[in-house]
Structures are given as C-alpha cells and as structure tokens.
C-alpha cells in the first residue's frame, strides 16, 4: 500500500484465521489472508490479485510489467516465491494441527524440498533489490515469514538471498513497516 501511496486510504483489520467467528470468513469463504474489502462490499482475495488490482486502480502500473513477456515472467516468478512461503506454512500447520505422534516427517521433508528447490530457482535470477515489484514483494514476504516462524533455517545456506533481503529492506522502507513490533529492531 505504501509503495502505491495508499497507506492512508486502506484500513488494516487484524484477523484470526483459526477463529470460526472472525469476520474474515464472511468476506473470504476460505478464511485466507489477505482479503481486500472494497467500500461497496466486494471482497478481493489472493495477494497477487490484490496487488494487480491496486496497481491498476491507482494507475501507477509499477508492480506488474505491462509487456506481455515480462508480465508472464513476473507472474510466474511471484508464485514461486509464494510457494516457498506456502511450504513453510504447511510445515507450521503440520505441528499446529496434529498431535506430536501424528506429525509426518515424510510430509515435512517434502515441504523442505519445495523450499530448497524454490530457493535454487530464485537464486538463479534474484530480482533487483532496488526495485519494488510483485516478484520482490512476494519474495520478501516469503523470507519474512521464514524468519518469523523459523520452519526452515535458510539464512546460513542461502547467503546471497539473505543479502538480497537486507538490500531490499534498505531500499524499500515499506518492508520494514510490515514487520511485527517485536521484530522491528532485529
């Protein structure tokens, strides 16, 4: 929102995806975040869809390229970064929603493999850390999630990606404003 100059136009409402009474489920039947609720009550969900909508709505068109080939590549690379975050989330859920004796090491290994393969593909073509677009936003969010939940230790194994995140955070002030208060100084 900050990148598009919308921080004063959009209210952020916390949600609890595990709370069956949370209003998030009224707007997004899957109960997933994020969910953008427009003034007329229309709900838009999925991070990429929300970014694309806001980018076009503001007329800025800076997050997603307009050139068909560049657009296709960006819209393929962003889900790769999202997939890293999704695999990390599934590892957290494996422990959160199962009793310890039910946790599947095969499943956890499968998800770690996705993270590792995703990192290998991302590192082959890291986005420009000084350019905020759909790919860099998706990657920064996935890495931030991994740092927060610690489902995979990645920093020591992927020094180049860790350096990219530091460079991106230095170049994009909005990234640091999205960190949890207890992480803001780390």
Image (cartoon, helix red, strand yellow):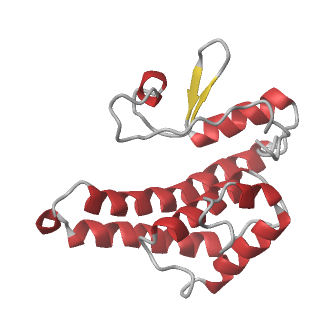
Residue located at (79% from left, 27% from top): 57
- The outermost residue toward the top is 40
Quarter of the image that includes the C terminus = bottom right
Give the quarter of the image for residue 58.
top right
* Residue 135 percent coordinates (x, y): 69, 56
- Quadrant of the rendering where the N terminus is positioned: top right
The residue positioned 36% from the left and 66% from the top of the image is: 111
Q: Residue at x 81, y 34 (%)?
A: 8
Give residue 103's position: percent from left, percent from top. Answer: 19, 66
User: Is residue 163 positioned above or below 168 on the image?
Assistant: below
Seen in the picture, residue 156 relative to 35 is either above or below; the reply is below
Task: Report the number of discs.
Answer: 0
Q: Quadrant of residue 137?
A: bottom right
User: From what the image shows, is residue 105 above or below residue 36?
Assistant: below
Q: Is residue 148 above or below residue 159?
A: above
Give x and y (percent) for residue 46: 55, 38
Q: Residue furthest left?
A: 101
Q: Residue 114 at what x, y percent from top left?
A: 42, 67
User: Would you say 122 lies left or right of 114 here?
Assistant: right
Instruction: Work out whether residue 82 or residue 66 is closer to the camera in this orientation and state it.
Output: 82
Front-lying residue, 150 or 8: 8
83 left or right of 66 in image:
left
């Amino acid at each position: 929102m900050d990148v598009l100059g919308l921080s004063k136009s959009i209210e952020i409402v916390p949600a609890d995806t595990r709370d069956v009474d949370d209003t998030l489920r009224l707007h997004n039947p899957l109960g997933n975040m994020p969910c953008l609720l427009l003034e007329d009550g229309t709900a838009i969900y999925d991070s990429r869809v929300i970014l694309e909508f806001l980018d076009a709505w503001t007329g800025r068109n800076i997050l997603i390229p307009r050139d068909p080939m560049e657009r296709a590549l960006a819209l393929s690379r962003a889900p790769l970064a999202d997939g890293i975050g999704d695999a990390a989330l599934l590892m957290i859920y494996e422990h959160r929603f199962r009793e310890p004796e039910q946790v599947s090491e095969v499943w956890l290994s499968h998800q770690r493999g996705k993270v590792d393969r995703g990192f290998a593909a991302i590192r082959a073509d890291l986005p420009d850390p000084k350019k905020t677009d759909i790919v860099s936003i998706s990657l920064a969010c996935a890495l931030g999630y991994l740092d927060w939940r610690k489902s995979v230790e990645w920093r020591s194994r992927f020094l180049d990606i860790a350096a990219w995140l530091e460079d991106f955070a230095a170049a994009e002030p909005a990234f640091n404003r999205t960190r949890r208060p207890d992480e803001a100084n780390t």
